[in-house]
Image (cartoon, grey):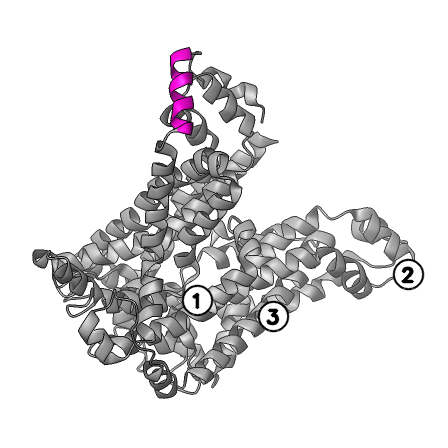
Amino acid sequence: MASSSERSAGGASAAGYYVYLIPGAIGFIAIVLVPFVMNTAASFTRWNGIARPRFIGFENYIRLFNDGTFWEAIEHALASVIAMSIIPLLIGLVLAAVLFDYISSRFGPRASSILRAAYYLPQILPVAVAGILWGWILNPIGVLDALFDMIGLHWLALNWIGDPTLALVSLMGVMVWLQVGYALVVFMSGLARVDPALYEAAEIDGAGWFTRFLNITVPMLKPEIFVVGLTTTIAALKVFAPVFVLTGGGPGTATTVPSYLAYYHFFTTNRVGYGAAISSIQLLVTVALGLLFLRVQTRQTEEAQ
Amino acid sequence: MSAGEFSGALPARASAGRSREASFDTGVSRYFVLALLIVGAVLTLFPFVLAAINAIKSPQDYGANGPVALPRSFDLTALVTFWNEVRFGEKLWNSFLISGCVAFFGVTISLFNAYAIGIGRVRGRGLVLIAYLFGIMVPQEALVYPIYYLAKTVGLYDTKTSVIVVFSVLQGAFGTYLLSAVLTAFPREIVDSAHIDGASRWQVLWHIVIPMLRPTLSVLAVFFFIWTWNEFLLPLVLLISNDNQNVSIALGSLHGQYTSAPTTSAAAALLGIIPTVIFFLVFQRTLMRGVTVGAIK
């Protein structure tokens, strides 16, 4: 065999390495593979988690298609894409460019890294903690309204998480706050491979900041823009914790997202098959986007070589 | 990449622009930009500051002077009350235990898998990697009910062990993918010559691969630790009893319980923030360096 001739001197055949895959394989089968198969199977049944599941074919999916709440949840997922992906990406891009190309060269790299750290901090805060923090700030007798009352803007002292329209806006605001740091840090690490001389040359040639931004920064960061855009889109489509801790999907269904809807059916209505159908659709979308991400990334690394 | 690629994108030389740019630098406008960024940073950090200043106020002080005023009283009652009510010390310990174990076992699983894939070049390694890639991409929502059901079946429901096992595997999937790439590029001559000298596979792993990989492994461990600390959905479902809950779940299931006691809300938030800020200060460099590593999650 090829493997034994490869390593005949040491006597360590490739087959012996399989032992090292065993702990991971057992874990993978128990935690990913079996649950995945069970969830997919459950999506074709009517099951309350206790009695025997009854096979009903595509009925869950057909119902889902006619379920207004599900479509509402999809709309909110798209709102999450705006708040967790698009807005933080744009803010992060501008911030990264300003910190790298303006602050760093005029006030030193230390100023820029302190500012970067400040914007990044919300990223590593447990979402549950962010939930308490913002719940306390946004509730009707909370900090924000006290602040508005204090400075005389009484008309802005609104029920930020209790009003159906405002709740979604507030949730989106918190998402932006959470996500800007991620985009910023990825973009800044991308800018680190840009030769500063390029900016200096452009500056000497009279290119203003915005021209440099459009003609150097954005094209240079194309790979990072793609990475940030797609990974945050995937994260936004399966967002759960910020919704759970801040609004609980409410008021009513005003901020329900697909993950929350699945959770609700799993553990509150006990319609496990229905919840499984929701999460199966999520799985399809996420894996499709993930594969797209990998394809483009592989192509990019091949081009770079 | 060379700078030449982009020279076409650069605008033509314009001497008027140069002098204007120069006056920008010496003028006040650069301080204006700096001030703008500082305002943005302060707004970002404002919620943290609010939690800190209100957690140490007395309720009377809060009532009289509002949430934005600096504390005129020093009252740790809210912090102490909240700490005792949710038995916060216990929650912290649970979070530490779970995250620490996941960091250790997750890295171990990743290393073993990557050793077989990258150094061992076992047959079917492509398939193994694809499986783990699926493990990285699959949303937890699509696993949560079966995991809950299976944990109940095998008697691991509502145990810290269940969460440790689940996240060691899920983080391990990510680590496997990352370390396999690192170990595939590992210098083969070192491994081969060690085998010629009679070293076993275990000895090569323990005495050669691990020491050389230590920096990467510690970055991975830091990330696993923090990611697990911040996880929400699966611990929420698996950890029901007060004895087993961690910081995230204890804080995440308050649901406005302390709305009428604002200083207690602030105290709760502050207690949740402090460990994060400590991790951040300790691991700042690792986090910033490794942030792109986590992009695929």
What's the residue type where badge 1 is placed? Asn
- Between discs 1 and 2, the one toward the N terminus: 2
Secondary structure under tag 2 reads loop
The percent coordinates of residue B201 (x first, y second) are 80, 62
Tag 2 residue: B198
Q: As rendered, which of B244 and A279 lies closer to the eye?
A: B244
Q: Label 2 neighbourhood size at 10 Å, few (<14), some (14-19), many (20+)?
A: some
Kindly identify the amino acid type of the residue bearing the numbered disc 3: Phe
Q: Quadrant of residue B61?
A: bottom left
Q: Chain of mark 1?
A: B
The Cα–Cα distance between marks 3 and 1, rounded to whole angstroms, is: 17 Å
Which amino acid does the dot numbered 2 rest on? Answer: Gly
Secondary structure, mark 1, is helix
Q: Secondary structure at mark 3?
A: helix
- Residue A11 image point, x, y percent: 87, 59
> Which residue bears the numbered disc 1?
B230
Do marks 3 and 2 share a subunit?
Answer: yes
